[in-house]
Amino acid sequence: MTRHLPRRSRLLLPLLVLALGAAAFAAVGSATAGAKSCGTVTLNEQAWAGSTANTYVTKYVLEHNLGCKVNITQIAEVPVYQAMADGKTDAVLEDWGHVDQQKQYVTKQKTVVMIGPNGVTGLIGWYIPDYLMKQYPQFKTWKGLKGKETIFKSPESGSQGMFLGGDPSYQQKDRTLIKALGLNLKFVSVGAEAAQVARWTQLYKQHKPVLFYWYDPQYLNATYKLDMVQLPKRFKGCRDDEKQGGDPKLYACAYPTYTLEKLFSKKFATSGSPAVKFLKKWSWTNADQSLVASYIAGDHMSPDKAAEKWVKANPKVVKKWLT
């Protein structure tokens, strides 16, 4: 048997539904109004393809999922600490361990905050082509270079062998390390990374000797077969940034393995922006970064399109970043 409501109840029911609906709408409106809007986020893109990959993938998610407006600065590794302290940029998504700057801005001034790893492990070292290592297996260690340095002669190095340095804005110690190891090599810089890459890849394609500063992850490592020259073992107090100065012997060690870190300006870290929560959770792998970097630098895809391609292919990863 169907149960019927009294007439008065039937008349009041639509009004009750409308009232409840209005209350629910008001509650949603209040929650939305109370939520912190994202506003503008400024990310710093540094001078290598991996940093571009980091920057544009996070930019895509910030804009499309959180409604942020994203600006991008392009400030070198060391000056960017001051830029964060000054509020000119909010976040660096890949820092390669600048100890002096961390002491000054993170520990002492507390104007920059170390957030944690971005998931990528970095490695810097001396590299040669695989074909050269096969020809000279003694080049597996730096000691094998002694007496054979002139193999690497170039127009810039004169009677010495050439060591092709990295981008001058990068942290490096090779000029001092060469001196500390007593090698007959001349440090040669040809400028930014693009110029360095053009130089060593040309020599590679010509099947000629070349010894150079390089690192991983780097999308070109999937295209060119390179081998690392083993440098002396690390010791307590060994240094990695020759701008610190001091006795060259302090630099006579291999570069460390870097756990790449995320840095925020203190102002941004304490802003309450939803972008902070997202960027804290954001991390990915060497393979992820190298793939996006290859889209950009290898396939000449625009960074925005490369980011979109990766994000759409990896919805589960993105979901973890956002929850």
Image (tube, grey):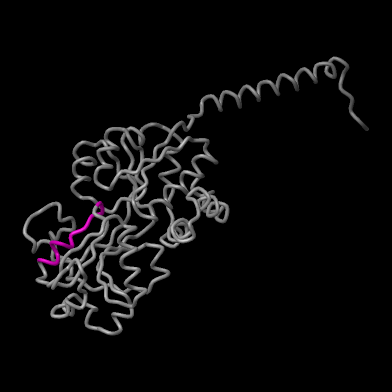
Q: Is residue 253 magenta?
A: no
Q: Up-down: is 19 above or below 55?
A: above
Query: Where on the picture, by quarter, is residue 120?
Result: bottom left
> In the visual, does 118 lie left or right of 165?
right
Left or right: where 92 falls relative to 236: right
Q: Nearer the viewer, residue 130 or 69?
A: 130
Choose between 77 and 24: the one closer to the eye.
77
In this view, the residue in front, 17 or 306, is: 306
> Looking at the picture, how far across and down is residue 291, in whole percent?
47, 60
The quarter of the rendered structure image containing the N terminus is: top right
Which residue lies most toward the left here?
A: 247
Q: How many marks?
A: 0
Residue drawn 50% across the image and 54% down it: 301
Q: Residue furthest top?
A: 8
Where 282 sits versus 112, above or below?
A: below
Q: Residue at the location (25% across, 71% down)?
A: 211
Q: Quadrant of residue 241?
A: bottom left
Q: Is 184 on the left-hand or right-hand side of 70?
A: left
Q: Which of the 4 image quarters holds residue 151?
A: bottom left
First to last magenta residue range: 169-179
What residue occupies the far front of the structure in this picture? 155
Q: Position of residue 131 (x, y in %)?
A: 33, 80
- Residue lying at 10% horizontally and 66% vertically, measured from the top left: 179
Identity of the residue drawn at 31% across and 68% down: 200
User: Residue 193: where, in percent of width, then height?
Assistant: 31, 57
Q: Residue 11 or 113: which is nearer the viewer? A: 113
